[in-house]
Amino acid sequence: MSNYKYDLRGVSATKDEVHKAIKNLDKGLYPKAFCKILPDFAAGDPAYCNLMHADTAGTKTSLAYMYWKETGDLSVWKGIAQDAIVMNLDDMACVGAVSNILLSSTIGRNKNLITGDVVQAVIEGTTELVEKMKSFGVEIHQAGGETADVGDIVRTIDVGYTAFARIKREDLIVNDIKAGDVIVGLASYGQSTYEDSYNGGMGSNGLTSARHDVFDHVYAEKYPDSYDHHTPDEVVFVGTKKLTDTITIDGQEITIGKLVLSPTRTYLPVLAKVIEQGLDIHGIIHNTGGGQAKVSKFIENRHIIKDNLLPIPPLFQMIQEESGTDWKEMYRVFNMGTRLEFYVSEKDAQTIIDISKSFNIDAQIIGRVEEGEGEKVTVKGPYGEYVY
């Protein structure tokens, strides 16, 4: 049933059509690297390489629009800026780019619906995140961008960023995940030392499914600009929750709307400190599109076994209960509470765990790597065992 709903909503957890379209494109200097790595076209130095990455907050902006209209709370737009930025920077950090990054924005809005104070909140959110990261030694430089009124093609607002970095090739982390490695997983939920409130762990993936499965059909009529009207009514806002319903987690009362809108956590302060240690890191995987099966794109003849994942946080429990999505699909669409993975020798695992916990981000050994034929991921959770 869940695949049927995804198709009707025009989304895909596996993005098969996209991967087919780009299959013949050059994969860069290191095809198994988490980001495409280019020669140093910027300066022509063979000891260096270039990275350029582009991403958006996806359909999370649609939920932010509804919440803002419902409550007048502009702060959610600062979170949207963080979503789009982190989807770039944390991907790039997985190959070792943790500072001296150039950042440019592309914002397209429907001026009839999105006011100037929303755009201002997005810009302020960008500046605030950049300043906060600077306090951890992560230098990000804002390089301007484009803000356009494109109401004919954008329903509400689209927020995207492009990032560029130039780093030494000797500093690169290129995935070479080995049999015998352990997997250290870092939590996507909780409240880190650099966050102002509890983070539900959503990230910026699976939002089309989450918002339609969780929230009440009343919003289809109330906010017709929040969804594609080619989508059959039977899969549009089919949940039971109101945006302002509340849930108490870790002693904090949070609205359901803000829980799902939790800004994508950046792991840059953690990654910068871990990389500083000079550990022998065989791979870093950011569990975005593809969820717990994401790693399968970066291995060859390996069997990834995740049999000790961090607990499923309340957000994903709620999404599953509201949607009825089978657990196997949940682990492929969502990070399920574990969004960053390090593949290392067992002797280095505790160092990473300790650094993560020093930022109040839970971490533990969540699994291991074995030899295999082809690329296989096995996830063992509290509700069953799933093979991808």
Image (cartoon, rainbow, N blue to C red):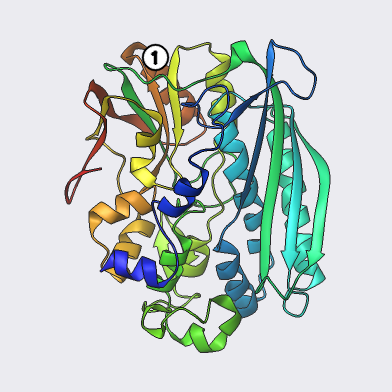
Amino acid on which disc 1 is placed: Asp
Of residues 18 and 358, the one nearer the viewer is: 18
Of all residues, the one furthest to the right in this rendering is: 144
Residue 49 left/right relative to 188: right
Of residues 357 and 294, the one nearer the viewer is: 294
* Image position, residue 198 (x, y; %): 50, 52
Residue 180 left/right relative to 129: left
Q: In which image quadrant can residue 305 be found?
A: top left
Residue 303 visible: yes
* Image position, residue 83 (x, y; %): 60, 51
Which residue is found at the position 65% from the left and 46% from the top?
Answer: 85
Which residue is found at the position 43% from the left and 56% from the top?
Answer: 251
The residue beneath circle 1 is 348
Of residues 353 and 157, the one nearer the viewer is: 157
Of all residues, the one furthest to the front in this rendering is: 24
Of residues 38 and 339, the one nearer the viewer is: 38
Residue 130 left/right relative to 174: right
Location of residue 49 with respect to 269 vertically, above or below:
above
Q: Secondary structure at mark 1?
A: helix
Which residue is found at the position 66% from the left and 72% from the top?
Answer: 156
Which residue is found at the position 23% from the left and 60% from the top?
Answer: 326
* Image position, residue 164 (x, y; %): 71, 34
